[in-house]
Image (cartoon, helix red, strand yellow):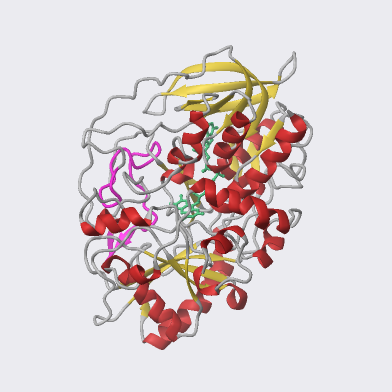
């Protein structure tokens, strides 16, 4: 099928086989974990780092998808932009010569301010995989709330640094459930194509996929799915498949074929650093302050907003507090980051005009993981590309799309691993706890049950047909379901509820939400293309009318 129709015009009228979604699953496979690098000097402060007292026309909080789109388009419209990012720049090699750690050998670079790894897939053959690491402002945050751990990227590029790159446009007929107040005609005619072009989305050559060793695991997934009568689809990605083929040929340094994912890809992946942010910087109007965290935004006496920013060292310790004034502030700290800030600022009176929808409508995109144990005559291969490319679409019949995920351990595991996106109806709320000074999330572990039921519509049937069983060793002892986590936080400042229909926050002109917080809890597919397309739509309107 044509890339144009798949990316640009949504899913209607094109071959069903090629476009459904996946999930940026990926695992915390550290079965063969070694020891990471031990030391690295703190990065020198980059030029253009924000100074206390600065007056900024447009300040963007966060450098993920929403923030990068906002920065590029504002700069192209002639506006000076400063981006504030709590994570590191990730632009310098460590003592092993690499910027990013390998997935099988997590080290201090891997986790945000933890002394022990918290791998999504915590066990293997009964052995726990987590290990001690030095506390450091690493790239993956496993942020714990009472009922769920939310994985998020930390650094310049946000989630694009750590994710599986699956770049999926939802089926057009499903957009009404995802973004009910947004015109599908505009999204599929203009903004999804713009987002896919800006992100550098590409598609895998099906004939190579059919023959390469590194996707044997995915072909086993296809065989099992099709024997049980499920539609199976290939999905686009932002990993450069031409580069992956060179990796296979041995002519370039390996990344996807060397188990890199989750803690960053040293090669091959078109993260935001290489796409939107590179273009934004090239305008000469965008500067970025890494290791700076926004803690407060409040109306300034003379107009605009007073923004308080803490500068951090790589141990996470505050080294300075800066106060600046911004004409306009774009909240792009991710669903959790934006929701936490807005919930706190409303509750503490800093932004009293925010409405009662603030912090509501949060969902996990229905994420749930599981593994299946295959027969010894059905190997999934010791070489597995870490970039997922395919999935099983049972959304219409059973409310689940299951990504066939890699388990790139370097050894034959005879396992099939899946991350399912499901139609989970539960929505949680962020609230401010004045006694602890923390924002809490009302999600409950039991709310994953509908997701498990939806995933079972696929895997119970496959297991029966294949005579196979679920793996019970991946998430603890005798535990089938990875129901403790999400990779896809969405909502908390929902479009048309906490904001107007373009992300303008109610009660405070000049404040905007422009990230995953706008989307009410589920996208039916992997979310970043929709987050990017919605940001493209909203910023175009904001530039036309507010600046
Ligand atoms: P995001 O990319 O999270 O960026 C927010 C940024 O704001 C981060 O860099 C934060 O460090 C920063 N920040 C937060 N609070 C503050 C503050 N107070 N001050 C300054 N900076 C702050 O937001 N999605 C897909 O579509 N396909 C996939 O294959 C896929 N795989 C994934 C795999 C993993 C392991 C994970 C964790 C996620 C995956 N996702 C995938 C989800 C995707 O990365 C996520 O939806 C987007 O990154 C969210 O984009 P936002 O712009 O909302």
Occupied quadrant, residue 66: top right
Q: Is residue 235 above or below residue 255?
A: below
- Give yes or no for residue 440 being in the magenta stretch: no
Q: In this view, does 68 lie above or below 534?
A: above
Image position, residue 266 (x, y; %): 31, 44
Q: Is residue 239 left or right of residue 63?
A: left
Residue 142 shows up from this direction: no
Image position, residue 320 (x, y; %): 47, 16
Image position, residue 133 (x, y; %): 29, 40
Closer to the camera in the image, 143 or 88: 88
Occupied quadrant, residue 446: bottom right
Closer to the camera in the image, 113 or 81: 81
Residue 381 shows up from this direction: yes
Q: Is residue 70 left or right of residue 349?
A: left
Q: Residue at x 51, y 22 (%)?
A: 310
The span shown in magenta is: 101-127
Closer to the camera in the image, 203 or 532: 203
């Amino acid at each position: 099928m044509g890339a144009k129709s798949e990316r640009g015009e949504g899913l209607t009228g094109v071959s069903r086989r090629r476009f459904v979604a996946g999930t940026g699953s990926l695992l915390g496979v550290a079965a063969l974990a070694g020891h990471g690098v031990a030391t690295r000097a703190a990065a020198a402060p980059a030029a253009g780092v924000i100074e206390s007292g600065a007056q900024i026309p447009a300040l963007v909080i966060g450098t993920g998808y929403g923030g990068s789109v906002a920065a590029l388009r504002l700069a192209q419209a002639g506006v000076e932009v400063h981006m504030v990012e709590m994570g590191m720049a990730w632009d310098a090699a460590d003592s092993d010569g690499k910027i990013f750690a390998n997935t099988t050998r997590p080290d201090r670079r891997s986790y945000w301010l933890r002394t022990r790894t918290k791998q999504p897939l915590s066990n293997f053959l009964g052995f726990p995989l987590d290990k001690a690491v030095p506390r450091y402002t690493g790239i993956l945050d496993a942020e714990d709330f009472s009922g769920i751990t939310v994985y998020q990227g930390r650094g310049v590029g946000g989630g694009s640094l750590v994710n599986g790159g699956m770049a999926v446009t939802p089926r057009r007929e499903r957009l009404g459930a995802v973004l009910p107040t947004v015109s599908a005609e505009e999204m599929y005619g203009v903004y999804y194509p713009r987002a896919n072009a800006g992100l550098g989305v590409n598609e895998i050559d099906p004939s190579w996929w059919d023959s390469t060793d590194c996707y044997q695991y995915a072909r086993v997934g296809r065989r099992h799915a099709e024997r049980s009568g499920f539609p199976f689809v290939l999905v686009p990605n932002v990993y450069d498949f031409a580069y992956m083929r060179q990796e296979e040929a041995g002519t370039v340094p390996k990344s996807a074929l060397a188990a890199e994912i989750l803690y960053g890809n040293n090669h091959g992946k078109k993260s935001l650093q290489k796409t939107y942010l590179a273009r934004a910087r090239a305008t000469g109007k965008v500067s970025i302050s890494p290791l700076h965290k926004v803690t407060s935004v409040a109306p300034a006496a003379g107009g605009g907003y007073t923004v308080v920013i803490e500068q951090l060292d790589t141990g996470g310790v505050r080294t300075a507090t800066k106060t600046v004034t911004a004409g306009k502030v774009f909240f792009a700290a991710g669903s959790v980051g934006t929701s936490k800030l807005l919930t706190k600022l409303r509750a503490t009176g800093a932004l009293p005009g925010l409405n009662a929808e603030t912090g509501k409508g949060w969902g996990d995109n229905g994420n749930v993981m599981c593994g299946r144990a295959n027969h010894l005559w059905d190997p999934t291969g010791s070489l597995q590309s870490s970039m997922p490319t395919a999935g099983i679409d049972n959304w219409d019949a059973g409310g689940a799309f299951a990504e066939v995920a890699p388990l790139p351990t370097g050894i034959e595991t005879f396992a099939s691993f899946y991350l399912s996106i499901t139609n989970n109806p539960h929505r949680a709320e962020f609230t401010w706890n004045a006694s602890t000074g923390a924002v809490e999330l009302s999600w409950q572990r039991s709310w994953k049950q509908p997701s498990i039921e939806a995933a079972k519509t696929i895997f119970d049937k496959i297991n029966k047909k294949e005579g196979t069983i679920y793996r019970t060793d991946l998430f603890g002892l005798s535990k089938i379901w990875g129901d403790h986590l999400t990779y896809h936080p969405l909502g908390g400042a929902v479009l048309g509820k906490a904001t107007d229909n373009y992300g303008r926050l109610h009660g405070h002109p000049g404040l905007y939400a422009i990230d995953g917080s706008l989307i009410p809890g589920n996208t039916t597919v992997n979310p970043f293309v929709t987050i990017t397309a919605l940001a493209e739509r909203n910023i175009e309107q904001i530039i036309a009318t507010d600046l």
